[in-house]
Image (spheres, rainbow, N blue to C red):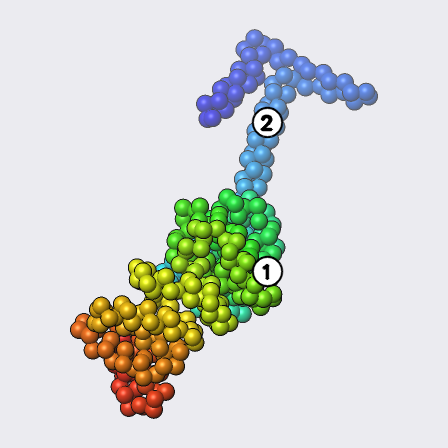
Amino acid sequence: MKRIILLIILFFAAIAISPMLIGEKGYILIALGNLTIESTVVTATLMLVTLFIILLIIIRVIRGGFNLSLGAWNKFAFASQRRALRNLKKGIAAYILGDHQQAEHLLVKSAEPSHFEQIAYLLAASAANKQGLTTNTKHYLAQLAHNQENLKDVGLESVLVTIQLLIDNEEYGQARQLIDNHHKHIGHDDRLLAQEITLSLIENRFSYVVEQLIAARKSKTITNDTIEQWEATAFFGVFNEQIQQQNSEALNTYWNNLGRKIKQREQVVFAYCRVLAENQITQPLSKILLPVIKKGANEKLLKQMRRLPLTSSDELIQAVQKHLHHDKHNAQWLSCLAHLAANSQQWSMAEKAFNSLVHLAGEQYDRVDLITFAHVLEKQNELTKAIEVLNKLVVEHH
């Protein structure tokens, strides 16, 4: 840049000196209407050079002043945003470290100034939820409500977290609306399907959940334990609806119309048996349970039978006693007999079976056995023994 300016000066200096060297100054005449301007070439050249230099100086000063004022304004105008971004970063770090109180404070403080309201309020809601601050959580979720419409902007993951927080805080209406707004993604995202099933069970939409379980079983991410829990709740609800809203015949028809594979699932079978037992429908109940006892192969279902309120179980007791006749020290059959007898209020038989069970080597009983044993002793006014059994429960299971 300096070389260019030097060349320009030398160029104009040559123009100014050259007339002197040749003995001619040269003249310039400019006529504008009645105005006439006359000057020598040297004078005109010097004036142009001077004006050019002044113009460069003015441009440089103006540009420098403009840059200075723009930088100062920018620094002042965006100071709050930069501070908010720092708070947002600190809040996220505090959330990761488990300092949920500090995280909530920083994230809420940074939400609007940082222009990252979605992530800030979402994490703040989660932090408040982990502290058990229901009111705060609901407030932050309300702040999120208007940002959930455009999925491209917020992302499905953000929607999923919001739905889960709404369900956790019993805001079922808002959760339902949000799921329905993104219902088309249920068939493509197993996480949203899981939330749909969870919320539908809360809403007692049992028949709908039974239909959705078909898709859930095809999922590669939903665990079998989770599906079994849903299945148990959904089918119990469906069976109960049949008998409550209609009658036992409707329940029997619904059961018979189920597919063979479905009727072989333990959770479905137990749900059906539970409804039958609670409504004292003994004949179809015995028809299902008697083969299970005779075969003795399904240990899981045999354990679940202990929870059934079987008031009339003589036929089942006889089948269990046949097993004990061949192996009187079998823990599984002693437990089964004791619970069947207790449920049918045959206290003496139940006490004898429990006594034999708890005296087997290796502590082959569990918490359910001890609780029922104490209940049997209480019913026979053997309070001291009942307390001893309960103490055994406390000592061995803590």
Q: For the point 78% across and 20% down, which residue is it?
A: 32
Kind of element beneath mark 1 = helix
Going by the picture, which residue comes out furthest to the top?
22
| Residue 131 visible in the picture | yes
Q: For the point 22% across and 72% down, which residue is it?
A: 328
Callout 2 environment at 10 Å: few (<14), some (14 to 19), or many (20+)?
few
Callout 1 environment at 10 Å: few (<14), some (14 to 19), or many (20+)?
some
Give the camera-side residue of 241 and 225: 241
User: Is 22 drawn above or below residue 258 in the view shown?
Assistant: above
| Residue 346, percent from left and from top | 36, 81
**Which amino acid lies under the numbered mark 2 shown in the image of this protein?**
Phe
The residue to which callout 1 is attached is: 174
| Residue 296, percent from left and from top | 30, 62
Give the camera-side residue of 388 and 395: 388
Is label 2 or label 1 in front?
A: 1
Q: For the point 36% across and 79% down, which residue is it?
A: 342
| Residue 74 visible in the picture | no
Badge 2 or badge 1: first in the primary sequence:
2
Q: Quadrant of residue 320?
A: bottom left
Q: Which of the numbered marks, if any, corresponds to residue 160?
A: none
Tell me if label 2 and label 1 are in contact, CB under 8 Å: no
Kind of element beneath mark 2 = helix
**Which amino acid lies under the numbered mark 1 shown in the image of this protein?**
Gln
User: Is 381 drawn above or below residue 45 in the view shown?
Assistant: below
Q: Quadrant of the C terminus?
A: bottom left
Going by the picture, which residue comes out furthest to the right?
34
Give the camera-side residue of 272 and 22: 272
Q: For the point 37% across and 61% down, which residue is it?
A: 291
Q: Disc 2 and disc 1: Cα gap in Å?
A: 71 Å
The residue to which callout 2 is attached is: 52
